[in-house]
Amino acid sequence: MITNGEIVTILREMAALYSMRGEAFKPQAYEKAAMGVEESDDEMADIHAKNGLKGLEEVPGVGRSIAEHIEELILTGKLHKYDELKKNLPVDIAGLTQIPGVGPKTVKTLYQKLGVRDVKDLEKACRTGKVAALPRFGKSSELKILRGIVFHADQSGRFPIGLVYPVVTRILKGLEASPLFSRVAVCGSFRRQKETVGDIDLLAIAKDPAKAMAHFVSIDEVAEVLQRGETKSEIRLESGLQIDMRIVPEESWGSALQYFTGNKAHNIKLRTIAMKKGYKLSEYGVFKGAKQIAGKTEEDVYQTLGLDWIPPEMRHDAGEIEAAASHALPLIIGYGDVIGDLQVQTNWTDGRNSIEDMALAAAKLGREYIAITDHTKSLAMTGGLDEQGLIKQMKEIDRLNAKLRGITILKGAEVNIMKDGSLDISDEVLAQLDVVGVAVHSHFTMPRAEMTERILRALANPHVSILFHPTARLINQRPPIDFDFEEVVEAAKRHRVALEIDAHPYRLDLHGALIRQALEAGVKLVIDTDAHSTAELAFTHFGEAQARRGWATKADILNTQPVDGVLKYLGKNQRKPRHEQKKQAHAVQRAGRGI
DNA sequence: GCCGTTTTCGGCCCGACTGTTTTCAGTCG
């Protein structure tokens, strides 16, 4: 099956190919369509299977003609038009244009004049000085391309936000402390708290921009200055992370903040709205003719366009603009609203710290309760606990709860879902736990139908309270498992099982679109850190960001409530079966005693 | 090629930086 990613790559190449032919507006159209596919929550193949060509045409930027292209790709895996265009230019366009400074026109010139087909050819051409000899090229163009190639070879792709968060926070603090800047903010995907960030966009106000820029390009960790101007500069840190800075006049702060936060699709829509109202929107403000009518704050930019202010996490043209226009944006959960953590690992299995250390560290962060959820026995590599281990751990938790003040420790487990959907801990022991999380940790590539069955069977166990990291993806490392999310959501609702937003920076699972889908079905969610050390207990922030992107309110997230509320909700999940079990047990006992 | 509270035709987001040009094309975000 062809994936959205593959379709996006082909549409982007088509855009480049048309651009090389000097076509005027097709390139933008294909670019836009690529963006629409990229932002789509659903696979094009699924949309096509359900609603055919019509369904595809509903994707933003996709019209009749591109929908037919996508259909052809889905059905045959090929695209005639693409092959035809490519015949004249049989080169690795996607690869070449990934190199900074190399765009479609450059690719064309390089092929026609030097026969460059891929990055390897280009590197050779650069090293032999052939590129510098081309018209409109020179020594420094050649060097820039070469540097781009070398950089790309050992560092490609995007960084998980959790990885860059400490670095960015530190740099931001440093710049804020400098008297040269009167204001500094991080924009871009970092401000939107996207799961991964490609580079960091800084925005600043400075009395003396030249001096301020000079300071910026010489901060400690800089490995290379890529660009340096009066109002715009780019640097690369030793870690490979690129940081751009723009300095804007004070009266443009709000519109610049808005503009550089994006995302692109969101911005294009805003500009279109501005245009229709007879305004012009740029990073410098909202203008009516030559007169600036808004832009000092982000709020007044949105207001001038007839919109409520939209939280950055929601800005990716997924209905938020329409909701803002009709004043129907939900009041989403705030940072710090989560007061408990329902997935925490300790040194009883693969965590680094003791139960007590984790509890104390969580209390320090202001958490009111945590659930200890160590792995279970079938996950041998983690030293998973068996029934006896869990019973022993419960006693230790009782001891600590009697001793510690200010935090409640709940008894839990991250119970492994076996290949057939059964759980590897007996119901008798599960019944004694406060929090039974279940999760998939193996056999990730099962066919969709089987995987769905597997999860449904696990959720049907009456003791289960939470489905941990439902898609099991690892960002940049492992794709999500394939299952029918709709069916799982329905089952979760039926069995009163909460779905987890795992805040660990490599998981962030569920992601925004799935969160919205779960909430629309009326399922409750929890935000957990999945911490394996005391330091990782701070990950909650990233889970809250995911929840905000998924339009979740405070009421949608169980662990924004005090511990009693959570236990009550989880208990309801278990009460009936537990009650019946007890009745049964009593009956057995009575029978045994001959009563 | 897409799209529509100005449009089914006629528009299409906007601006900075670089390199190499002697006024601007290409790239990027």
Image (cartoon, rainbow, N blue to C red):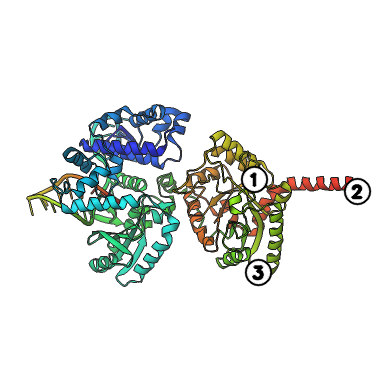
A56 lies left or right of A538: left
Which residue is tagged 2?
A593
A400 lies left or right of B29: right
Judge by depth and name the residue closer to the eye, A411 or A292. A411
Of marks 1 and 3, the one in the foreground: 3
Q: Position of residue A9 (x, y in %)?
A: 34, 39
- Label 2 SS: helix
Question: Callout 3 environment at 10 Å: few (<14), some (14 to 19), or many (20+)?
Answer: few
Q: Residue at x 53, y 46 (%)?
A: A472
Q: Chain of mark 1?
A: A
Q: Residue at x 49, y 58 (%)?
A: A541
Which residue is tagged 1?
A496
Q: Chain of mark 2?
A: A
Of marks 1 and 2, the one in the foreground: 2
The first of marks 1 and 3 along the sequence is 3
Q: Residue at x 48, y 30 (%)?
A: A50
Marks 3/2: CA–CA distance: 43 Å
The first of marks 1 and 2 along the sequence is 1
Which residue is tagged 3?
A405
Judge by depth and name the residue closer to the eye, A333 or A353. A353
Type of the residue with mark 3: Arg
Q: Position of residue A513 (x, y in %)?
A: 48, 44
